[in-house]
Image (cartoon, rainbow, N blue to C red):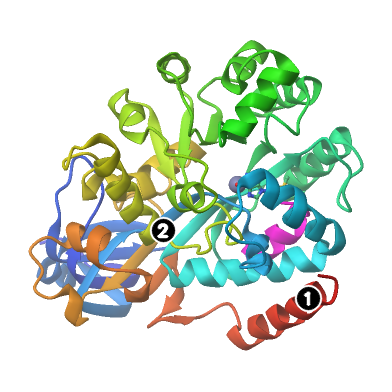
Amino acid sequence: MQDTVHIDTLIEARWIIPVDPQQSILNHHAIAINQGKIIGIQPINNAHSRFKAREIIALNNHALIPGLINLHTHAAMILMRGLANDLPLMEWLNKHIWPTESRHVNTSFVLDGTRLACAEMLRGGITCFNDMYFFPEASAQAVLDSGMRASLGMIAIDFPTAYANDADDYLAKGMALRDRLYSEPLLSFCFAPHAPYTVSDKTLTNILTYAEQLEVPIHIHLHETLDEINLSIESHGVRPIERMHQLGLLSPGLIAVHMVHLTDNEIRLIKQHGCHTVHCPSSNLKLASGFAPVTSLLDNNINVGLGTDSAASNNRLDMFEEMRLAALLAKASTNQADALPAHQALEMATINNARALGIDEITGTLASGKAADITAIDFSDLHLSPCYDPVSHLVYAAGREQVSHVWVNGKMLLEDKKLTTLDSTQLHNRAAYWEECIKSTA
Ligand SMILES: CSC[C@H]1O[C@@H](n2cnc3c(O)ncnc32)[C@H](O)[C@@H]1O
Ligand SMILES: [Zn+2]
């Protein structure tokens, strides 16, 4: 007879989907959580004899999955959602987004925008995101307020903004922030040079040196559009991936976002160097950037994660949408119905993303010893009944509206669809304020 173990929380569920290659789906099991960590996953009856929980949450018609991770976003840009639509990337950036950013983006914009984005992401079952934006100290504050996990970009872009004067200033500010918040358990950092067309060789080389010293990943937009590739050939004589290769940036520390226009040789290089890639299907479709060769990347055992990009180009921060689109696009673009099956889409949104961020020992699957970053999906709606395969429903039939509960590091941040850390009324008021500001200068 084993001793009873006193724990914080026991969550019972109809299905537990660990997204762990060693584990299949578990029916009528419970997850035991103590001090922020998963300490056991057992059949419900066994769990009750083994654990005495301060709080028991019975989710009898729900699935529990690892918290979804958004591997590429610019959270604060949610305040520009719907501002400029139906445009290709360069026109969208040059004529609309960059002028608006230059007029309005400051600490308070980023704080309000990132809080609003955290609210949307939590309501959609996202527990962690990888961000790239100006004033990351304000993003950090919003993330801490929300209780989410995040990786923040130490950004660099070779033009001055209200945030920094030049590349060295951007990097100094980013690294000072990292030094200050280094011990925050839910925060991590990436270097985030914006893109090949906005960052010089010198800045990229400096970033590489710092990234190697500090053992921090580099997060960059890469091969997003044909315009980007043509610009690189005009300015540098080579395509962007070749340039990154020449500069020494291709490595397992690189998180390359978009990766839309790739030759076989470029795929070989990415594989050889163990780079991580991020597929952003909605953003690529909406900006007409093209179709990333995701199936070829996966067939070459390249790690492919999933991201939303910003709410200004997507226009949602919805990882259910990205999983479904990734799966459907892979099938249509290869004429293979078995390309990118549902479970693989779920892996991309969880463990693949955690691996890219170097936090796969902490999160990305449901297993004993990992942080309790958990998303519960309610299967009671009519469109999810009957259910032969919960993973199929998660990717092809369910949506973020079915997310009922979210825990990060054992703390419940969404309870019965209600945010526990962020104030929705305040978020509405601040969004209305920014709408007026931006409209007044349009
Ligand atoms: C240096 S902060 C981030 C910078 O990136 C811009 N941005 C947003 N979405 C995209 C995209 O899809 N491709 C390239 N750049 C993008 C954003 O407006 C900020 O200026
Ligand atoms: Zn982006």
Residue 388 left/right relative to 245: left
Q: What amino acid type is highlighted by mark number 2? A: Met
The front one of 170 and 290 is 290
Question: Neighbour class for label 2 at 10 Å: few (<14), some, many (≥20)?
Answer: many
In percent of width and height, residue 251 lies at 54, 20
Q: Secondary structure at mark 1?
A: helix
Q: CA distance from mark 1 to mark 2?
A: 29 Å
Res. 218 visible in picture: no
Quarter of the view holding residue 204 = top right
Asked whether disc 1 touches disc 2, contact meaning CB atoms under 8 Å apart, the reply is no
User: Residue at point 73% right, 56% down?
Assistant: 97
Quarter of the view holding residue 142 = bottom right
Q: Nearer the viewer, mark 1 or mark 2?
A: 1
| Mark 2 lies on residue | 319
Quarter of the view holding residue 305 = top left
Question: Neighbour class for label 1 at 10 Å: few (<14), some, many (≥20)?
Answer: few
The front one of 96 and 141 is 96
Q: Which residues are magenta?
A: 133-145
Q: What amino acid type is highlighted by mark number 1? A: Lys
Asked if the residue at label 2 sits under 8 Å from ligand 2, the reply is no
Res. 304 visible in picture: yes
Mark drawn on residue 439? 1
User: Residue at point 79% right, 72% down?
Assistant: 438
Query: Which quarter shows the N terminus?
Result: bottom left
Is 431 rendered above or below residue 43?
below
What is the chief secondary structure element of the magenta stretch? helix
Mark 1 or 2, nearer chain start: 2
In percent of width and height, residue 245 lies at 59, 14
Q: Secondary structure at mark 2?
A: helix
User: Residue at point 37% right, 49% down?
Assistant: 350
